[in-house]
Image (tube, coloured by chain):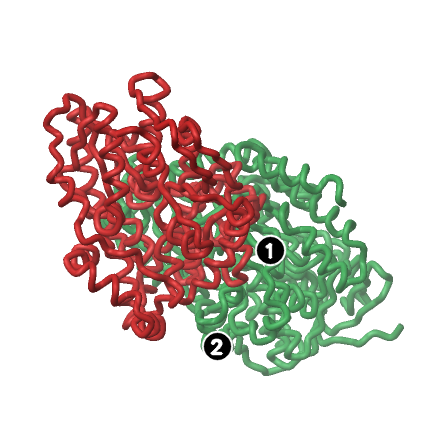
Chain colours: A green, B red
Amino acid sequence: MALKEYDVIIVGGGITGAATVRDCALRGLSALLIERGDICDGASGRNHGLLHSGARYAVTDREGAEECIKENRILRRIASNCVEQTEGLFISLPEDGLDYQANFIKKCREAGIDAEAIDPAEALRMEPAINPRIIGAVKVPDASVDPFRLVDAHILDAQRHGADILKFTAVTELVKEGGRVVGVKTQKGDVIRAREVVLAAGIWTAGLAREAGVNIGMMPSKGALIIFGHRVAKMVINRCRKPANADILVPGDVVSVLGTTSDKVPIETCDDMHATPEEVELLLREGEQLVPCLAQTRIIRAYAGVRPLVVADPAGDGRNVSRGIVLLDHEERDGVPGLITITGGKLTTARLMAEMATDLICKKLGSSAKCETAVKPLPGSEGRKPRFKDPFNMRAAIGRHGNEVSQMDFKTGGEILCECESVTRAEIEYAVKNFGVRNISDLRRHTRIGMGTCQGSFCIKKIADVLADILKVPADELVKEYRQERWKGMTPVMWGDTLREAEYMQKTNKDEI
Amino acid sequence: MTNLEQCLKCNLCTLVCPMMEVNPDYPGPKKAGPDGERYRLKDPAFFDYALKYCLNCKRCEVACPSDVRIGDMIQLARIKYGSQARRKGLTGLRDWTLANTDLVGSLASPFAPVVNEVLQLKPVKSVMDGMLGVDKHRTFPKYSKQKFVNWFRKQDQSAFDKFVSYFHGCYVNYNYPKQGQDLVKILNSAGYGVHLLEKEKCCGVALMSNGFAARAKKQGAVNLASIRKAADAGEPVLTTSSTCTFTMRDEYPDVLGLQNSDVRDNIMLATKWLYEKISSGEVKLKFRKDFRMKVVYHTACHMQKMGWQLYSIELLRMIPGLTLTVLDQNCCGISGTFGFKKENYGFSQKIGSKLFEDIRTNNPEYVATDCETCKWQIEMSTGIPVLNPIEILAEAIEL
């Protein structure tokens, strides 16, 4: 089969790959993004959903902090429907002292981050749930970002500008001709050719590069997180101290996300990431210091992701390694033309990473097209946000998809199927049409279906029936796949109300499936 | 703090919600309560105005196996986020009038004969229906020429050495003093003198459901202060309205944030108090030998929530010559002032239809219930007269 030859192939469907394929498409390059699973299967779907202001890095990494605040401001504009402008607080407890805070404010301001010290009593008025023992608080422009929506928006925009997206297709090797990378070979045995290949596969980048004779020293750093059932605070709550475990609580949509840990893990474990009981214990112990009521708040699930850190020296725990952007021109670095790697960085700085990578691609391809991603709004964020006067069942959808709701048919699809997360049939149909979902787990990433309190115990059958009908597959297979995935996140936190929910889930669904 | 996280999404509450059955626009207790609360915590703009359809019957809370305070959560959301939904213009005037039972009662009583006649006139009803949105099928309960408190002042209670306090409520005071008079007669014949509270205000239930929670809280504080004085004097505070009782015992702390744990046990329905006194032998009533009555008992929603229908039913069963049938618990649909509003009339009648059918099938002489708004609804919808158990008891004993 003769396959199209592209200007550029991007390997990896996380935020870095998605932002890069969008940038390439906007600059008029013919681009293909290839991903072995669904989008956000890796670290992009397993993080805090924090749009950093840069404050967290201000003391230790000035350059990273400056990148963050710049990108933070850009994303608020271009991805307004993915970003919730919650703002953030850095709180000091007596054991943290106020010396760190003074230096922190100074460093933030040097990096261009508005950091404003506020009275502890005022902070407690703003956020009554935070630890009442606080001795200081600093307000910073942190925000909450929905990583799934952000990646989807990039993918949509890339497609609308002519890019191709090939999901559920693994790249088995990089195809080389005369020392030059000329394309990729997929699991199906197809060879797809391109003038440049970009590796944006997070921690999986190293393995792919090695195949092509290129060595990238990567250090997988595992971060575990816990999701709580509802919002306990409106703002992002950080600890004002040297970055450590479990010191950030982010309000994400209707939940609260606490994290993270940071541990070096063997690269072989990266394909099956889950939180361990010890990590959950540590997160809860530390999280309680930040917001005491977390000790009594229902946990929905725990999960873990892998930061793709690039190191010269693979020792250390990962927190002291720079999380800076790494752009590798393998022609220059390793004498392998046709291959570029973009990795490191953060969710917040992915657009900048993509710009840097695409600048290099254009240079290689002799294109002089300028980057427009900092000014062009993403789909869903174009124009004015739809008003909330619409029927109630549309409101959550507007919050998630912004202007993209105009692509959804709420007249026939207004029925709410996932009640915890208020997801309608119209959103399911939209996701199937635009993102090629295969099962309920895929659907979850694109709609939030089953992400809520009941983890699908109540609604999953209904959803399986709807999806089975569209995809022409057996509904019970869909339910089975989904359950396995949900158990993974619920098992480490199976006590109290989560245990009751799990029992309910098991008993009510036992016989019918 | 509401306990939304204990919700397992089992939907038992959805199953028992009377509004869910008749109104597709109402999201139901689960969605309006714990599901909606998660969104309201994210952004108050997620407040759904369809929450106005909640009857506050609390049947969802009775059904919930996880003890989630669903009804309270909905009430609290309406107070916190929905106050701007208070209607303006003539409908606002209507809601204000319906809510301020105390004030409106005081204004209307002196002119009771005129007001009663005027409110029944067809042209007046159609104007109220058309302009104010008070459904034309409804007739306001008639105002009494003499207020209960004025009657009570003439009753000499000085001969007694044991006393109870009586919270009469707006309906007894302005509309139906007979019910209070009956209680005083029963208590006196049982050897107890009656005191009124030092200061009594409307319990506030109508204020709360019409968006005047702050006023309700103020009135509640006044009531609690008087109830505390009665408690200090060793007197229980008896009531003859299940909703006033429920409001003062449970809505005060759970919805209005008025702490009442020191006196909560002191507030109780007269039927409960009487039942306990009679069954312990402390009170002996002499029943008429020639008394005959065929009665069905309807459990008001708030009675069910308190779990006190038992006392009213058992008290009625003590009456020789009374044939009693206990109806299945079904909401009558009126929910206080809710059913008076034109836009709700249809829902009210649909919700109540099962109850009405049940009553008609039994064909009783009287329906007994502890709630006055159930009384209005049942009388209007079935034509069968409704009595409070206290009235039946007063009729059955030799005074």
Establish whether labels 2 and 1 are both on one chain. yes
Check disc 2 and give the amino acid type: Val
Q: Secondary structure at mark 1?
A: strand
Q: Quadrant of residue B42?
A: bottom left
The percent position of residue A357, horizontal first and vertical second, equals 60, 68
The percent position of residue A18, horizontal first and vertical second, equals 62, 66
Residue designated by label 1: A418
Q: With respect to residue A453, does B163 lie above or below?
A: above
User: Which chain contains the residue that carries disc 1?
Assistant: A
User: How many marks do you count on the picture?
Assistant: 2
Crowdedness near tag 2: few (<14), some (14–19) or many (≥20) residues, C-alpha within 10 Å: few
Mark in front: 2 vs 1: 1
B282 relative to A78 in the view: left or right? left
- Considering depth in this image, is A343 or A407 the residue closer to the camera? A407
B7 relative to B167 in the view: left or right? right
Query: Marks 2 and 1, Cα distance to the nearest angstrom?
Result: 35 Å
Quadrant of the drawing holding the C terminus of chain A: top right
The percent position of residue B92, horizontal first and vertical second, equals 29, 67
